[in-house]
Amino acid sequence: MDSLNISLIITTYNWKEALEVALLSAFAQTVLPDEIIVADDGSGPETKTLVEQLASSAPIPVIHSWQKDRGFRLARSRNRAIAKASGEYIVLVDGDVALEKHFVEDHLAFCRPGFFIQGTRVLLDKDLSAKVLERKAMVQAFCHKGVKNRKNCLRSPLLARMFSFTSRSLVGIKTCNFAFHKKDAIAVNGFNEEFVGWGREDSEFIVRLLNSGIKRQNMKFKGLVYHLYHSMNDRTRLKHNDHILQQTITRKLVWCAKGINQYLRSTPERR
């Protein structure tokens, strides 16, 4: 799949220091994506300034996709970024992660038609995260006491072949390290914008992909991301979001009514 065009989408909201780490790690990849789109859910002008500064000397195009701050609207922010993407393949990460230098290369190696990729993450504690933010780069993680799940630090092609697996489970869904074909996302109308507030918008999107026949591929021991410590998000909308997710599961839905089609030049047929 080496000839596939890749759009790396990085989500962010008012944490420019973490976003800088994510962008700099993306610029240092062994295989660069064809473009980076910053999916910004309403950050202040400091984030725009940072993106413009880094984009001016970046080795690839960097696009700032910004929307007004009207609360947590991650589904909408992602849909708008995906609609703008020129790549056929979308690699999605959060703006609070550092990418291991083979991250894009590893995702390309696992990419195949009819599958989405669920990657894993390395969790960093508060102290180690502060060091990464200060250096603006990841430190050696495997032997560091600030790593919470040390085995995820291992990058091994051999272990990746042995332990990567396919699944239909929702367990472990984390779109901070996630990849899919753009056409597959459009076919299910992208992320469901009924989700406002933190939680479950990623799981619901996955359910509709699975219902449409797309399979889940778990990538282990490759495509590593290092997740910076932060306080827990506001979960006051979680009960409502759980209800939307359960409706999608129960009714075996493939399409959501309010999704990516409103940002596309031509609207796909409803499935």
Image: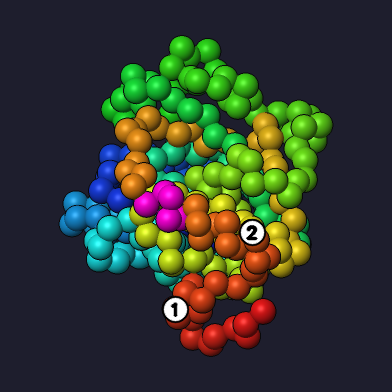
When asked about the image quadrant of residue 127, the answer is top left
Q: Residue at (55%, 57%) from the top-left corner?
A: 245
Indicate which label's residue lies in the foreground, 2 or 1. 2
Is residue 209 visible in the rendered structure shown here?
Answer: no
Q: Residue at (60%, 27%) from the top-left corner?
A: 152
Q: Residue furthest left?
A: 45
The residue carrying mark 2 is 249
Q: Residue at (39%, 63%) from the top-left corner?
A: 77
Report the span colored magenta. 237-241
Please state which of residues 261 and 136 is positioned toward the viewer in this rendering: 261
x and y, in percent, of residue 9 in the image: 47, 56
The residue carrying mark 1 is 263
Is residue 227 visible in the rendered structure shown here?
Answer: yes
Horizontally, residue 137 falls left or right of residue 141, namely: left
x and y, in percent, of residue 217 in the image: 72, 48
Image vertical order of residue 178 relative to residue 140, above or below = below
When asked about the image quadrant of residue 71, the answer is bottom left
